[in-house]
Image (spheres, rainbow, N blue to C red):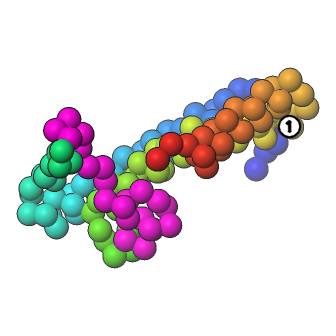
Amino acid sequence: MRKLSTQHDIDLMIGKLLRAGVITASVITILGGIIYLYQNHGTMPDYKAIPGHHDLFEGASLYLREISTILPQVFRLDGAAIVQLGLIVLIATPILRVLFSLVSFIIEKDKLYIGITLVVLSIIFINMIFGLH
C-alpha cells in the first residue's frame, strides 16, 4: 500500500469511507425492515398515545434504546433491532469521518485543525454520554 502523500489521497479515502458507511447502513436497514415486516406479518407498529397525554407517543421499546441490548437481539434476527443497528451504523459513519480527519491532521502536524477536530469529537461524545433521554 502506498503512502498517503497528498490531500487528494486523503479526500478519496474519506469519500470511500462515507460511501461504504452509507451503503452498509442502507443494506442493514433494508434487511432489518424486510425481516421486521415478515415477523409482524406486514403490519405497521401501533402508535398509541400515552394515557392522559393525547399529543405524546410511546417511544421505541426499551431494548431498542441501547447498543448493549440491541446487539443480542440482532443475533436473534429481531427485525426492529436490525433496523436500529443500521441506524447506528449510519450515525457512526460521519463520526468515523471526523476520527479519520483527526488522524490525517495528526499526520500533517496541523495543530489548529487537530484542536478543532478534538473539540468537535468531545462535543459529540459528551452528547452521546450525557445527552437527554
- Magenta stretch containing residue 65, yes or no? yes
Q: Position of residue 70 (x, y in %)?
A: 42, 65
Q: Going by the picture, which residue comes out furthest to the front? A: 52
Which of the 4 image quadrants contains residue 97?
top right
Q: Look at the picture and state if 107 lies above or below 88.
A: above
Which of the 4 image quadrants contains residue 98?
top right
Q: Look at the picture and state if 49 lies above or below 105.
A: below
Q: Look at the picture and state if 18 lies above or below 116.
A: below
Q: Position of residue 23 (x, y in %)?
A: 42, 45
- Magenta stretch containing residue 61, yes or no? yes
Q: Secondary structure at mark 1?
A: helix
Is residue 28 at least partly visible in the picture?
no
Residue for badge 1: 106
For the image shown, how many numbered marks are present on the structure? Answer: 1
Q: Residue at x 76, y 50 (%)?
A: 1
Q: Residue at x 70, y 32 (%)?
A: 120
Q: Residue at x 34, y 76 (%)?
A: 76
Does residue 74 appear to the left or right of 57 in the view shown?
Answer: right
Q: Residue at x 16, y 53 (%)?
A: 45
Q: Position of residue 34 (x, y in %)?
A: 21, 58
**Nearer-the-camera pick, 47 or 83:** 47
Q: Which residues are magenta?
A: 53-73
Which residue type does callout 1 highlight? Ile
Which of the 4 image quadrants contains residue 117?
top right
Does residue 62 appear to the left or right of 104 in the view shown?
Answer: left
Is residue 54 at least partly visible in the picture?
yes
